[in-house]
Image (cartoon, grey):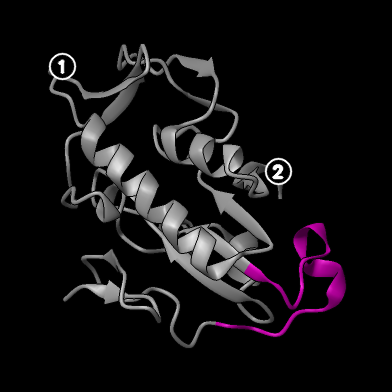
Amino acid sequence: MPVRNRHGDCISRNSCCHSGLPVPLGKDKYPLGVCGVKLMVSACLLGENCKYNGGNNQNQKVMDLLADNEIVPICPEVLGGLPTPREPAELRQGEVVTRDGSSVDLEFRMGAQKCLQIAMREQPNMIILQSRSPSCGVKQHYDGTFSGKLTDGPGVTADLLRKSGFRVIDVEDL
């Protein structure tokens, strides 16, 4: 059954990952001094199984933020209509393609647009995204050769959100 945020946007095809997990922490344990704000976060970082391989990228620093902040989870790929699991995709010369060269650029860009709509409605103080993703990579992404080689530059969602004026950070910078 799809998981939906409080406005009815489908964020995942799996069950909610963070119900009941908040744990009170001391102020010194909040990355970047984040406490009492609205954060938009890649759903995979919250333990949601929405990665291309059906897994997640649960991150303890992000999980620690659940206690005292409003969290708006997003998965651009799922919002763009892609299934979980799905073929791996990378950015190649500005287009998102799968290993066999099939374009999934439209789905990635539709997902990015839906994330922008959510961000415009929710007005998060900060957006925390998964590293190196063709959608969410903030500083780098894989180069499209499917060889593990990285190239500088953002993924499609990170790029759109940043160009729209939102504060976007890479999870590795927490």
The residue lying at 65 percent from left, 60 percent from top is 61
Mark 1 or 2: in front is: 1
The location of residue 128, given as percent across then percent down, is 59, 53
Which label sits on residue 173? 2
Question: Which residue is under mark 1?
Answer: 101
Q: Which element is circle 2 on?
A: helix
* Residue 91 rendering spot, x and y as whole percentages: 35, 22
User: Can residue 148 be seen by looking at this rendering?
Assistant: yes
Residue at 44 percent of width and 14 percent of height: 149
Residue type at the position of mark 1? Gly
**132 over 170 or under it: above or below:** above
Image spot of residue 26 (x, y percent): 83, 78
- The picture places residue 159, in percent across and down from the top left corner, at 52, 34
Answer with left or right where residue 67 lies relative to residue 130. Answer: right
Magenta span has 30? yes
Q: Residue 94: which quarter of the image? A: top left
- Front-lying residue, 31 or 157: 157
Inter-mark Cα distance, 1 to 2: 32 Å
- Vertical relation: 66 (above or below) 128: below
Q: Disc 2 marks which amino acid?
A: Asp
Numbered range of the magenta stretch: 22-38
Q: How many marks?
A: 2
- For label 2, count other residues whose C-alpha is less than 10 Å away and answer few (under 14), some (14-19) or many (20+): few
Whether the magenta-drawn stretch holds residue 135 is answered as: no
* Image vertical order of residue 145 relative to residue 136, above or below: above
Label 1 crowding class (10 Å Cα cut-off): few <14, some 14-19, many 20+?
Answer: few
Q: Is residue 34 above or below residue 171?
A: below
The N terminus lies in quadrant:
bottom left
Q: Which of marks 1 and 2 is nearer the N terminus?
A: 1
